Image: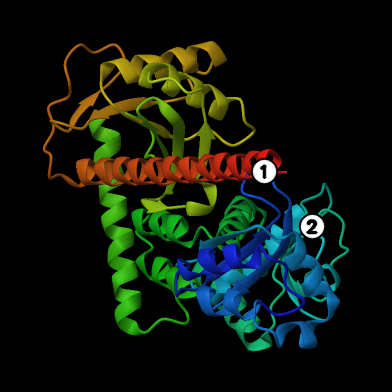
Amino acid sequence: LPRYMPAHVATLKQQIRSLPVKTGVYMWRSGSDEDAEILYIGKAKNLKSRVSSYLRETAVTTRGTRLAAMLNRARTIEVVVTPGGERDALLLESDLIKKHRPLYNVLLRDSRYYPFIVITEKTEKQLPKLMTSVRSDLEGARYFGPFTSPAALRRVMELLEAALNLRHLRFQLRFGGESVEGDYLEAVAMATRILEGDTVGVAKELFELGKEQSARIVLAIDSSSMDEDENARSWRRVQENAKAARELSQLLDIPKIPRRIEAFDISHFYGQYTVASRVVFLDGEPARHLYRSYRLEQINDDFSSINKAVLKRLKSKEQFPDLMIIDGGKGQLSAAVNAIENVGVVDELRVCAIAKQEEEIFLPGRVKSLDTNIESAAMLLVRHVRDESHRHAISKMRKARRDLFREDSNLSAQSKEIVED
């Protein structure tokens, strides 16, 4: 190893080998636990290549002792792939840095010279305004960015104006058109969601309102770096997801179309290393940065495990899903319903279970499963979400086994050294 690199870098190199060759955000952490400190957050067009560059001997000469200090504390690398490309990676990187304020991040803490898109706060005297600024000290404002490319910033602003008719609405407001104030506030709210990354969700809503051209423009914001074929595929995906969500709301008798779906599954190894997984889908697409896992007691009881996992989830401060899916049958569903009743949110949550063998859907209070078409768009969505939850649970269980095995191996090695001494 290079002289400035600690011995544990060999473990980091092993982790880097499995990183995706995709665009996204990477985080250097001080450990593998969820509470481990985030030391540094960055973005990359090629995650594997970018993270690998930190471990080259020439890196320390160009980045100084700050890199060496960070690597000395780093134990794991976590990545989030951004399907929307580099623009989404830039926005996510900025949001995560502001949220976690990592010790070794410097650039985005002092980003005065990079412009932001700013949405000002609504007050009694003034409506919110969408604008650009290099200032980051406007009280109550929301900031999106920074944008390292002024051309990209102008492009996003132009598309937002076109998609949401903002310029025309502002003109009407300026000349006494108070009747359009509600439309203007709704347009600003949609712009906020788009800048937060919910382009697919907004496009879906516009499409359902008959505003197909506006929906296409919103997708162009998310796909400005893609070619026409990719943009067309993205548009088809929005339509397919919208259809599946509508069918699902009808199948499960949900009053509103489920935009946020969460699914739970349990994985263990002969009653040990029990892990519960929670995956999140937003408008039919996996939102991997919202995935969670819960290490539970070493018991071979899926019912208790589901109950504890759902309780932990509902006691968190995250927004509730429109639909919760449990991987299992009537027993697992009852355990989840019991947790929901304990928290007192029965009226706020819709929940169902899907059993693996016959792909049956069970609802609370019903003895028999629903009569479903297994190949319908709604069922394909449910199965996709369930399968992703199952994959995530197995992945986290295997990681728990590896971590505990390493700890046991280290303890055995230490014990051997003491005996030999």
Q: Is residue 355 left or right of residue 184?
A: left
Give the number of the disc on residue 101. Answer: 2
Dot 2: element: loop
Q: Is residue 36 left or right of residue 267?
A: right
Tag 1: residue type? Glu
Q: Earlier in the sequence, mark 1 or mark 2?
A: 2
Q: Residue at x 67, y 50 (%)?
A: 31
Q: Residue at x 57, y 74 (%)?
A: 87
Rendering coords of residue 144 (x, y %): 69, 66
Q: Residue at x 23, y 32 (%)?
A: 251
Within 10 Å of the Cα at label 2, are there few (<14), some (14-19), or many (20+) other Cα atoms?
Answer: some
Would you say residue 253 is visible in this rendering?
Answer: no
Rendering coords of residue 184 (x, y %): 62, 57
Residue 70 found in image quarter: bottom right
Colour mode of the rendering: rainbow
Q: Is the residue under label 2 in contact with that under label 1 (CB below 8 Å)?
A: no
Say which residue label 1 marks: 420
Quadrant (top left/top right/bottom left/bottom right) for the N terminus: bottom right
Q: Nearer the viewer, residue 416 or 320?
A: 416
Q: Residue at x 26, y 50 (%)?
A: 243
Q: Is residue 230 above or below residue 411?
A: below
